[in-house]
Every structure is written in C-alpha cells, then in structure tokens.
Amino acid sequence: MPIEQAPGVYPTLLAGYQRLGIRSVADLIRHYPSRYETRPDHTAVVDLVGGQPGAAAGIVARSRWVSGGWGRKGRFEAVLEDDTGVLRMIWFNSPFLRDKVQPGVRLTVNGKVRRVDGMAEMVNPRWRVLGEDEAPERAGPRLRPIYPTTEGLTSDRIAGHVSKTLAWALEQVEDPLPEGLRKDQNLPTLARAFEMIHTPDQEDDHLAARRRLAYNELLLVQLGVQLKCAFIRDHYSAPSIESSDRVDQRIRDRMPFTLTGAQDEVVAQIASDMARDLPMNRLLQGDVGAGKTLVAVYAMMLAASKGWSSALMAPTEVLAIQHYQRLAQTLTGADLPVHLVTAGMEVPALTADRPRLLVGTQALLNREGLTERIALVIIDEQHRFGVRQRGQLRQTEAGSAPATVFKKHHRPHQLVMTATPIPRTLALTLFGDLDVSTIREAPQGRRPIQTKVSSPEQMDHVLADVIERARAGEPGFVVLPTIDDRGETDDDEETVLGVEARARQLMNSPLGEFGVEMVHGRMPADQRQRAMTAFGSGRSKVLVATTVIEVGVDVPDAGWMVIEQAERFGLAQLHQLRGRIGRIAGDTPCVCHLISRPTTDQAVQRMAAIVKSTNGFEIAELDLQIRGMGEFYGTRQAGASPLRMARLPEDEPLLRLAGRDAKGIIKDDPRLMRPEHRLIRRVLELQLGESIDLIDIG
Ligand code: ADP
Ligand code: MG
C-alpha cells in the first residue's frame, strides 16, 4: 500500500516521508524506532521529583488561557489536584486546550517535572483524559518508541501512522524463515518482531525483535553473496593464466624496484588466482603509498605473457595520465604497447596475437566488445567510482544467464584496489565474495605527519607557517571543497571561497612568489596537465585544488597541506587527501592544517579521529563507528543498504550465525527450490535484487 493511502497521511506529510525513503506501508513498518523512552510510573503529586520525568493523575481544578500579545506566545495554564497536592501545567500556543482540559475533568499527565518555589510544574506535558473508572497506570504502554524524523514529520506523527496501520500490515506479513530454523535460534516470527519493535510491552521485547530483524537481514545478505558466488562458479570462466619462474623473472626484470615482501606476497596470491579458470575477484587494500601500482603492473604483465590484454581504470583523468606515463616508462623497450583511453579517444582493436595494456578513465566503460579480449581488469581507487560503473566494465555482452550451460561465459579476472580499507566486519558481510589482500607496510617508510585543527580566524597563522615551508623549498597543497565561492554561509555573512578565488588571492599574497598553480575538474585537460607538470617539476610550490588530487597524485616531496572547510569532507576523504604529503622516508614532520568550524557532532568526531590517527585501517573502523552502517556505502539514498537493523561491528556474533545458517541452507538446497525456501527466494529476488548486484561488484 502506497504511504499516501495510509490513514492519517496527509499530502503535506508526503515530502517528509519521501525524504525518509518511505514510499509504502511496508517501508513504514521497517522504519524502526531509534530508541525508546520509558514512560514514568504514576506517583502522587507530592512525590514528583524536580528535574526528572514524572507522571500523575488527578482532577483539573482551574484552567485559563493567557493571550500573548506583542509577539509573545499565548499559553494555556491549568492546575491538577490529587489527594496530596497540586501540579501547575503550562502549554504554549495551545488555545484548543480550553475545550478539552476543563475544570472537573480527570486527567493523566506526564512530562518533565520542575519545582518552582517548591511547587510542582510541567511545561507542555503529554496528557490524556481518563475514563470514569480507568486506572491511570493503564494509560498507554510503558515504552514509547522514538522514530528517526525529518523536517515536518515528528516522531509522534510517525508513531500515529504506525499504530494506525500496524495491525492491518502485520496480517500481510509472511515469514520467509523456515520454521525449523526459527525455532532452533529461538526467534520470534517476523510479524511478532515487527509488532514488538514498534509496540514493546517490556524491555526485552524490542531486544528480541531487534535480534530477529538483524538476523533476517544478515541471513539474506549472506545467502545473496553465497548464491552469487555459486552462480559465477557455475556460469562464468576466465582464462587460466599460468605463470612460471621464467615469466616471473622476466616481469621482475622490468620493474623499477625490487618488490617488497608485502608486494611479493600479494603478487603470489594474484598469480595463483589468475592460474585458475575461475574469475578472480580480489580486493587489494593498502594505505596510500603502500605500493599498489607495482602489483597492478605485475598482474598486467603476467596477463600479457600469455597474449592477453588488460585494462587499468582510474577514477580521474589526472590519475589515468599519471599511470599511463609511469607504465609507458616502465615498459620502454618491451614489446607491449600501452594505450591511454580517455573520453573521445580511439581504442585500438584488440587482437589475440598482440596483447596491449589499456589505461584509462571511465571512458573505458563505453567501449563495446572490449572485455572479450581482456583477461584482467584492474580498478584503482575503487571507492571513487560509482557502484554501478564498477560493475559495467566487467560485464560481458551476455551479462545475464548464458544460453547454454555447456559453454561458460568469459569474465575477466578482476582486481580492485583501494586505500580506504573496508572494516573487517563489512568485508565479511557485504563483500563476502571478495578475496582480500592487504599491504600493511609502505615500501620506504614515510615522514611523520602532524595534523592540526584551526578555526578560519586563525588562517593567517596557518599561512605564515606555510609560507615558511614554501620558502624552505617544500611544495604543498591548499585544498577546498568547491570550485566556486559559496554565498550562503552558515553563521556569518562572509563568502566562503572556492578554488578559483582562493588561487587568485594566494597568487597575489606573499605565497605568490613561490608559484601558485590551480587544478580542478572543470579546467580543460591541457591546462590541468600544465599545472600538474609545473607543480610536479618543482617550478611551483603551491597547488590549490579540489579533491581531484585526492587519489594517486604522486609528488613525493610535498610536505604540507591546508584543507579548508574540512568539516565538509568525510573521514576517509580527509585521510586520502592527507596521504598526498609525506610520501618519502624521513624524520622531518609534515604538517596537515585542517581549517574547520565543525557544527555537528559527527563533524567534531571526524576532526578528532583524523587528528588522532594516521592509520587507514584504524580510520576505517572509526568511520564506520561514527557514521554507522547505513551511510557507509556512499550510496546515500535511503534504503540502499540492505542492513537497517543489523549494526556492525556490534552484531558480529549474529553475522557469524547467519553466515553458518546460509551455508547450511545452500548446501541442502543450492537453488532454493524447496517449498520452505520459496519465500526466501522471492525476498532475495525482490528486496535484495539491487543490492546483490552491488555486492557482486564490490
Ligand atoms: P599506492 O599504493 O598509494 O598506489 P604507489 O603505488 O603510488 O602507492 O607507490 C607509492 C610510492 O612507492 C611510489 O613513489 C612508488 O614508486 C614507490 N614504490 C612502490 N613500490 C616500491 C618498491 N618495491 N620499492 C621502492 N619504492 C616503491
Ligand atoms: Mg595508487
């Protein structure tokens, strides 16, 4: 049932529901309370304690409306009497109470108690008229659900709609969980779980409900992941590329460095994956500067050794060009052509007799038939790509079910690289089908980085520090979130500068003599490239930029960074940005200045986290803690994460249970064809269809 057809949902409330991602009553029922408030026990008025929530019942002795005037709010005042004393009550802006809270009426009220000169008082208490013989304790359940809200839609409003639709909705709920499993785990039915989560009778109810709902989500996700793995195993194959000592040596001879132990290890894992005819699906995570590119180059050369082409995709043109130049340089003299593929460029025809390396941006995605001759796809800095784009490159023309079960479909090996590690528990859940390799140590150590937070008012001090560093010959970055200025500001009326204005300003400041360059995404490619070259060669010491420099830009001796309006960046992003400096070994500390005026709790926590840690794995865990599951995906769209109730890492035990049960189910019934699995199958198709795609792509 569409939400607009639910009783009490007026058209004016629809925008709010839309913002919350609630389109149907089913969505509403899955809009879980974020917490519960305990309704206070009724006491005698004399026992109400100031500063605490309280509840009392009695007879209204007097009441009156006091009109406001001169722009002040009007208020309705009443006095409630029981055998022990009187309670003063004030409601602002509520003239309609005149007709309801009249003298002589029996009332139950609850709210926060104030003691004013010893007299008990409540402001805007909740109230209800009591029936003749009705006992006050029975007036409503003890636990009141508090729902996540949005502008124009209060928790009480939502609660009202839930309570009007719940009974009807629960009748429609079918439980996908096989009875046996449910009983084994001592879980309530799905309908009962929904009921308990919205209207718990007692403390334990919503905990039991939470457990069931979280288990449900985790089980479905685990089933989805495992089915997908099985599907790929059954229907797709990749070319088996076996290595040999000779091939290995030839590749290493081409490398500009001796591989580190960590790189060796990952290379061995990849070689063993690629030797199989099952498509590799591996994630390589390692902090910025860990040396992932060399591993990628190794894998591409391995593919080429058997005549296969491969593609390396980068999220920005700047990075694609940089990769292209490095690769071309590394491979001079080798009989292995490297091609840059960016928007509007020709792609060479791929033939079996001549392997090639394609390096490019998303432009690689739009080429038809490309994947047929490609054995290996490498995606660099995967977190920067849209989820959908990542999947595209890997898909063969017949991406769906193959026509015959005898011929498996070609699917390239895939290596996804990221400097934003996936927290461990997420790796087990949503990315359960990925093999993960990790490089923990950077090849040559790095200069330590000090991170300092300053307010915009302290910008002069920050610039003085930076000027000194530039004068000493050290290049650095000034990063801003936007290209253009922003007029609408938070508190003060001043304009917040964008990259263009700030770059102009710095050119005309004392910093100007050290050469100020600018890069952002709207500049023509050749201008951007010129700026990068000037900065990379040391002619310019100051690069003013947007986050285009977040990934891959490799100017190893850069030693300082100023990030303006830092509260507008995510934690992972701040870490990435900071990773652009201090990329050589040494003891002289680099500095990262965050200019920030955090206004939300989350922003304050982010600043604290980034100052505290320079370890990408630690930061990923902190990020998950601060943001919670829902938003972790970058797919901010409400409902995109299949996990609404399950919380990681807290729910890890439940996750393990669900993983084990999912295995059991699939082992007995690999295609979920049994009658008791009919509903699970349908739910997976319907509810997770989209997310399952996301999971596969990883
Ligand atoms: P990231 O993992 O961030 O992509 P890069 O691949 O850009 O890191 O490598 C970071 C730096 O380390 C580069 O300057 C690269 O040339 C250097 N590097 C990579 N591997 C080695 C190695 N085995 N020995 C020495 N330096 C290396
Ligand atoms: Mg890199």
Image (tube, rainbow, N blue to C red):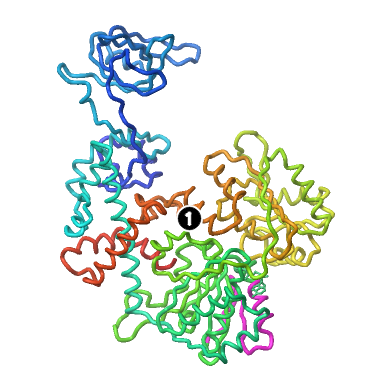
- Residue at figure coordinates x 45%, y 55% from the top left: 635
Q: Position of residue 265 (x, y in %)?
A: 54, 76
Residue 649: quarter of image: bottom left
- Residue at figure coordinates x 34%, y 56% from the top left: 653
Q: Position of residue 536 (x, y in %)?
A: 74, 66
Q: Is residue 308 magenta?
A: no
Q: Position of residue 72 (x, y in %)?
A: 48, 15
Q: Which residues are magenta?
A: 322-350
Label 1 Cα crowd, 10 Å radius (few <14 / some 14-19 / many 20+): few
Q: Circle 1 sits on which residue? A: 634
Q: Is residue 365 left or right of 582 when viewed as pictured?
A: left
- Residue at figure coordinates x 35%, y 75% from the top left: 232
Q: Which residue is nearer to you in this view: 29 or 561?
A: 561
Q: Is residue 427 left or right of 170 when viewed as pictured?
A: right
Disc 1 residue lies near ligand 2 with CB under 8 A: no
Q: Is residue 345 magenta?
A: yes
Residue 299: quarter of image: bottom right
Identity of the residue furthest to the top in this view: 62
Q: Which residue is nearer to you in this view: 260 or 386?
A: 260
Seen in the picture, residue 57 relative to 520 is either above or below; the reply is above
Residue 662: quarter of image: bottom left
Asked whether residue 423 appears in the rendered view, the answer is: yes
Disc 1 marks a residue whose amino acid type is Gly
Asked whether residue 5 appears in the rendered view, the answer is: no
Seen in the picture, residue 63 relative to 452 is either above or below; the reply is above
Q: Give ligand 2's quarter of the image.
A: bottom right
- Which of the image's four quarters has the C terminus? bottom left
Q: Position of residue 615 (x, y in %)?
A: 58, 58
Callout 1 secondary element: loop
